[in-house]
Amino acid sequence: MSEGGLKAAEDIETRVREEAKTPALYRVFLLNDDYTTMDFVVRILETVFHKPPAEATQIMLHVHKKGMGLCGVYTRDIAETKVAEVHERARKEGFPLRCMMERE
Ligand code: TYC
């Protein structure tokens, strides 16, 4: 679909959702890098995204091998808060870990 077509489709989705009062949802992803430790990423998945230990390890390994991985799907405010929290905690520890969100 063209950029304009995508925008038009999103506008229609937004209108339908607002009529039904269901909020837009956003996927939050972690991105791989060469410096952040695996332990730190697992800790982020357990504490910020509330993943059980085995799932946190699976997601971390997926990101390590594939380049990015889904951490969860949230409303916009919650997704923004989680992205900011990941970046804040990573910078405090000196890691370049990146986190991003995209509308579902
Ligand atoms: N690639 C990192 C390493 O080998 C581990 C890592 C995994 C980093 C996931 C970031 O989102 C990430 N230490």
Image (cartoon, rainbow, N blue to C red):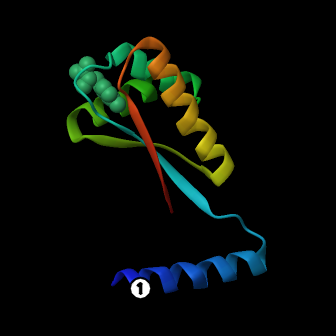
Q: Residue 43 location, x and y as percent?
A: 48, 18
Q: Residue 44 location, x and y as percent?
A: 49, 23
Callout 1 secondary element: helix
Q: Residue 2 location, x and y as percent?
A: 33, 84
Mark 1 C-beta to ligand 1 under 8 Å: no
For the residue pair 87 and 63, the one nearer the viewer reads as 87
Q: Residue 40 location, x and y as percent?
A: 41, 16
What residue appears at the point 43 percent right and 38 percent down from the top-left corner?
99
Which of the 4 image quarters holds residue 63? top left
What residue appears at the point 51 percent right and 29 percent down from the top-left corner?
86
Which of the 4 image quarters holds residue 6? bottom left
For the residue pair 62 and 36, the one nearer the viewer reads as 36
Left or right, 64 with respect to 3, comes to left
Could you tell me if residue 29 is visible in this image? yes
Q: Is residue 19 above or below residue 62?
A: below
| Number of marks present in the image shown | 1
Left or right, 35 with respect to 87, comes to left
Q: Is residue 75 above or below residue 92?
A: below
The residue labelled by disc 1 is 4
Give the residue type at disc 1. Answer: Gly
What residue appears at the point 25 percent right and 31 percent down from the top-left corner?
64
Q: Is residue 35 above or below residue 1?
A: above
For label 1, the crowd category at 10 Å Cα-Cα, with few meaning under 14, some 14 to 19 and many 20 or more, is few
What residue appears at the point 44 percent right and 45 percent down from the top-left corner?
100
Q: Is residue 74 above or below residue 41?
A: below
Which quarter holds ligand 1?
top left
Image quarter where the N terminus lies is bottom left
Could you tell me if residue 52 is visible in this image? no
Which of the 4 image quarters holds residue 93? top left
